[in-house]
Image (tube, rainbow, N blue to C red):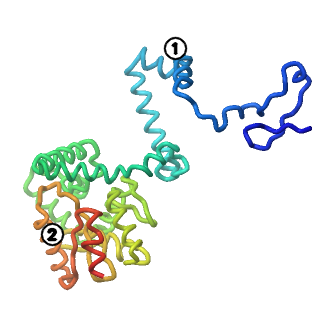
Amino acid sequence: MKKLCKCGCGKEIIIKYHHRYYGTPSYVQGHQNIGRTKTDEWKKNMSISKKGKETWIGRLKRENYDKFLEHQKKAGKKGVEACRKKKVNCFFDKKLQSKGGRIAHQKHDYGIIFRKAIDDWKKRDYKGYIEHQRKASKKSLELHPELHYNFGNNWGSLGGKISAKNPENIKRKTEILLKYIKSPKFKVDIIKHLENIRKNKRHYFNGIYFSSKEELKVAKKILEYELETKLIKGKNCHIIIKTNNSFREIDFFIQNKIFIEYHSYDLQGLSDEEYYNKRRKILDDNGFSDKQLIVLKSIDDFEKQIVRCF
């Protein structure tokens, strides 16, 4: 008579000679704990049993902490480079996310929790919040200058590393810059630069990189409410508008009627009205005076501000 595994997997237990002395097992090897809940006492005993078994990385951390930190930095950089090249990490592949992490994100939307905390801070101490953002921006510029587009840092390379001490050199440098600004290459370089910034932030959806998680949610809402069938970069998403000496970007242009700009806060300390007027002027000066502009401060106001317009 066949004896099947008690866990319910359906596998047959192979009868062996020594079972006549010790008894036939009820489970296939390794199946005895399937479906069995682990008590707190069992977990505690397992933790105690593993104490004292030091790993090589733990020993390195205890004996030479500086060497340990150096090893961690190198390993981290190699890991990030490998993940970006192969596009294999928790961001690109949700199968790699831990079960606990997936459950936690289903129960708690940490983006909304964080945004609420930021909104409370802005209501409580707006000046302190703006000052904090300015300091964070300066620190980011010091640590990662390659991620920030600043003409001041690029003038040397554009002007052939001309010294700014001589007034003649300043004039020459200005001429080179103006020539560069008027050339088609200027627009191409700005678009590439903005795209690189978005790629580094890695908020990817529908074949497009976005500047923030909230902006990505706005894009999802646009498709969810069927305001657009598809988002196309340069047509209804990330529209580049030429100004006098530069280019500006607007987040969305829905049904050739409404421009949408997602702007939750301003690092320069501009009020909501000042920021709106600034963006409105860019559109008015470039032939879009008949188009409506909506500045969205929060994803929660999407229905109230945008859906009602259609």
Q: Residue at x 35, y 76 (%)?
A: 236
Label 1: how many residues lie within 10 Å, few (<14), some (14-19) or many (20+)?
Answer: few
Real-space Cα distance between discs 2 and 1? 62 Å
Coordinates of residue 31 in the picture (x, y in percent): 72, 34
The amino acid pointed to by label 1 is Gly
The amino acid pointed to by label 2 is Tyr
Q: Quadrant of residue 215?
A: bottom left
Coordinates of residue 230 in the picture (x, y in percent): 43, 75
User: Mark 1 = which residue?
Assistant: 52
Sequence order check, earlier mark of 2 and 1: 1
Q: Is label 2 in contact with label 1 (beta carbons under 8 Å)?
A: no
7 vs 67, left or right, is right
Q: Is residue 92 above or below residue 23?
A: below
55 vs 217, left or right, is right
Q: Is residue 43 above or below residue 227?
A: above
Q: Quadrant of the N terminus?
A: top right
Q: Quadrant of residue 140?
A: top left
Q: Is residue 106 above or below residue 22?
A: below
145 vs 74, left or right, is left
Give whichever of 34, 90 is nearer the camera: 34
Looking at the rendered structure, the secondary structure element under dot 2 is helix
Looking at the rendered structure, the secondary structure element under dot 1 is loop
Q: Nearer the viewer, mark 2 or mark 1?
A: 1
User: Mark 2 = which residue?
Assistant: 276
